[in-house]
Image (cartoon, coloured by chain):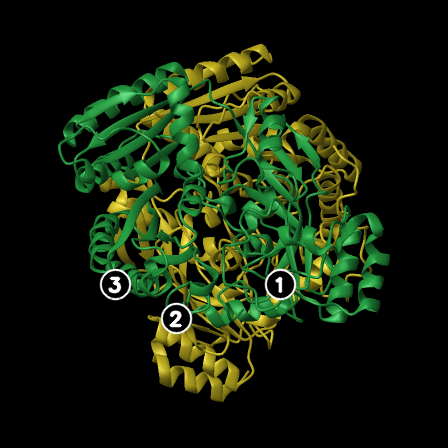
Chain colours: A yellow, B green
Amino acid sequence: MNAKLIRELEHRLGHESVLSHREDLLLYEYDGSVEVARPECVVFPRATADVADIVRLANKYETPIVGRGAGTGLSGGALAREGGIVIAFSRMNRILEVDAENYRAVVQPGVVNLDLTRAVEHLGLYFAPDPSSQKSCTIGGNVSENAGGPHTLAYGVTANHVTGLELVLPDGRVVRIGGKTAETSGYDLTGLLVGSEGTLAIVTEITVRLMRKPEAIKTLLAVFEAVDDATESVVEITRRGITPAACEMLDGWTLRTVEDFVHAGFPRDSAAVLLLEVEGLAEAVEEQAAEISAVCLAKRAREVRVARDAAERDLLWKGRKNAFGAIGRLSPSYYVQDGVIPRTKLPQTLRRVEAIGKKYGFRIGNIFHAGDGNLHPLILFYPRHPGEFERVVAASDEIIKHCIEMGGALTGEHGVGMEKNELMPLMFTPSDLALMQRVRAAFNPTGRLNPKKIFPLGKGCGEVRVHPLPLSTSLPA
Amino acid sequence: MSYIAEPSLARLEQITGSDAILTDAALLAAYEVDGMRPAAAVRPSSVAGVAEIVRFAAAENLALIPCGGRTKLGIGAAPSRYDVALDLSRMNRILAYDPGDLTLGVEPGVTLADLRRALSEHSQFLPLESPYAASATVGGTIAANAISPLRQAFGGARDFVLGMEFVTGAGESAKAGGRVVKNVTGYDLHKLLIGSLGTLGVIMRVNFRTFPLPAEERAFLAEFSSAESALSICRSITHSPLEPRRMEALDAATMRLLGLGQATSGSAEKCWCVLVDAAGTSAVVARHQRDLEGMARAAGATQFAALAAAERETWLGRALEFPRYVAERSYEAVLLRVGAPPTTMIALVAESQRIAQSFSVELAIFLPAAGIAYLALFPRQAGNGPDVLGGAVTQFFAAISGNAVNARDAVAMVEACPTELKRKLSLWGLPREDFELMQRVKNVFDPRNILSPGRFSGAV
């Protein structure tokens, strides 16, 4: 550990803004993933100028820098894999401007996702990205990981809700990209930066799009006797062009686990439920809800329940959003994947996931964003059982490979981080990855920003395990 | 006209095959950009073919301009050099279409018109519209980030493009994004190509999400006697629960240019129309009609009516073609495209009118969606165009950035103007602070600067 660096940081930021004792750092070894990595110090800037100075000091001492919001990320994005300085944004948590007339807000990265919605709801507005961790996760973290959430289905991920950023570049310079207008002048740098997982620059200010709260909302719970009936309902809803705002699925084991904890009202004897929401004009909501009910019933749903009031709706969502907490009661560790498949492939994919679970001897729970094909297969394990985690990873990789074979993606909303970086060759060719790494080097030439994330390290984890998804053949559809 | 040494040209022909290269001067006239004529046009039909051509060009230091329907090559600065037109119109296949998943992958040369037909067979559409709709291609529309009025409801291309494959300026095939509706794997490099004017890579495949066609569509037209009242209904609409597909505001000069409507109010010059297109089930469309009529009355509309189907086609179709009407009206016309917070639009309109008057140029204002404006300037006396218009444009840029509370919240570019004016003007106004980052990106994608050199911002 570099005592001089710590002293300089303390001198610049004050003692109360630097943590460097081992016991203080313990908390920052973790995020929401299964990975662990310890930083050398954690600093708490209050302003962009502080961040710029921290970056300059890091350069002087050739020390890595990793940004951190609330540490709820699921891919190790906020972990200091190479040690160094963690910049924690908890004190940069001000909403700088609410421009309701133009549906924009300007926020610091440490603003908690749900706090922004709470601050603007009296104006009839809200911030659409709604990860399950929205009570604690920060907008800075959402930007880094390009976070999603159940309502991504209708409104898109974080990238669709960010129009401008202020950045501190790795050389300490402050640059603004984009602004309040969704139009771009030149290359869409904002589009590139969102989801770059803290590897290109440190984001110190964010201009977000706010949305108008819908006039009407209906929340439906469709209850099924068979998983296949639920997945086929999703396929049919998609095929018919019905666009619910959210379409979540919980399988029988998961919904029972959640029900025991949250008492959300999921029938314990069912094989699967779909939690669906339709929003918008009252007229559209009525019609869409009726159509969704009809589809589910035609696909043998046992019942389709409509939440009678806001309280019942909140309870159903509480069941969905607290699911991971409920599962945490059963097992000290669980591993959750984030693969995406084309929605038409949902039924066979869930059957495959079940078969993979049987093969490796795991119970795999499924609670996921069915409407956009974003799976979250969840495997419970005991980290102290020798070899068990390795088997979890093997089962997980098999699921992910299946997703890619279906034409899907490695991660729908959790990010690559240090969790899936070795799997990147599943989706991208060496030349795809080389280009991305050259872009990284153009912004972050020393590699000091969030090192060893996103890209395969090409060592330690053995050879590339499969052939990458090829470029299109010239065969027409 | 560009000149390529004979042995070089022969090697290029070897690469493409003799049926995929044009060197005849008369045929090459169709590939001119800002008066520059290439020495050859090549028409590859595969990704491998494109990559080989680009590698050859990089080795020989030949400047390439990728093109498709060639309807938007006038956008951007004049190229600094131009040797070979990379015509992608033969790469016009739909590579993958999964209607059940609402996803689509196409080659760059597919025309928007062909795509619309293919999708409508499955009652779907892509919210990508573009002037010169009959010949515009997907690749060109994306590379130019053409204004689609549907962005009122669906956002810009970045909101529904899922991924791309492309060939870099070094001749490498690469891809970014994916083919599914949700994906955060790796850097979203494809977003950089949207609006890049062919300066970063040659687009080989674009993956989109598609959307279901609505059961019903109906357009409504409200007429006002001032810009203030026209913009006040636009504000009411965007702050209401209504979700119209399009919301376009046209001033009197724009309507005259498009041959639309007849101003009925007393002062015809001050007349504005707001065109709103609603879509959905009949109950949803009826709700729009009811609410819009109330809003029109409250905003002081002099008229409000639903358009008959044929009329609707005419209005929407001509409004979409606004840039074409501007170009056809006068070779000397200047077309500015502005993005700014909607609340600043009314001041922008007033300021634009003041500038137009002081320079004695004709002005047509068209707002194709909330927060976007087209300003078309025409010289009053043919021949004295460039100087007068150049002075006006400089003032416009100052007004646009002066208008917004933060200059960076407004962006503007000259989308069309005569070549001689391009050489005198900065088409993007004052340089922005992120320009240096864009240059770094350009150097990564196109280290030899052979892809559309000079077209973007002059310096990139």
- Give the side of residue A92 with respect to residue A405, left or right: left
- Give the side of residue A374 with respect to residue A425, left or right: left
The quadrant holding residue A254 is top right
Helix, strand or loop at mark 1: loop
- The amino acid beneath tag 2 is Phe
The crowding category of the residue bearing disc 1, from other C-alpha atoms within 10 Å (few below 14, some 14 to 19, many at least 20), is many
Mark 2–mark 3 distance (CA, rounded to whole Å): 36 Å
Give me the residue at 28% from left, 64% from top. Answer: B395
**Rendered image: mark on residue B402:** 3
Figure quadrant of the C terminus of chain B? bottom right
**Rendered image: mark on residue B352:** none
Q: Which residue is mark 2?
A: A44
The answer to whether B259 is drawn above or below residue B196 in the figure is above
Q: Which residue is mark 1?
A: A453
- Dot 3: chain letter: B
Mark 3–mark 1 distance (CA, rounded to whole Å): 42 Å
Helix, strand or loop at mark 2: loop
| Residue at mark 2 shares a chain with residue at mark 3 | no
Helix, strand or loop at mark 3: helix
Q: Nearer the viewer, residue A12 or A152?
A: A152
Estimate the x, y position of residue B283 in percent, counting from the top left.
35, 15
- Give the side of residue A167 with respect to residue B136, left or right: left
Mark nearer the viewer, 2 or 3: 3
- Dot 2: chain letter: A
Figure quadrant of the N terminus of chain B? bottom right
The crowding category of the residue bearing disc 2, from other C-alpha atoms within 10 Å (few below 14, some 14 to 19, many at least 20), is many
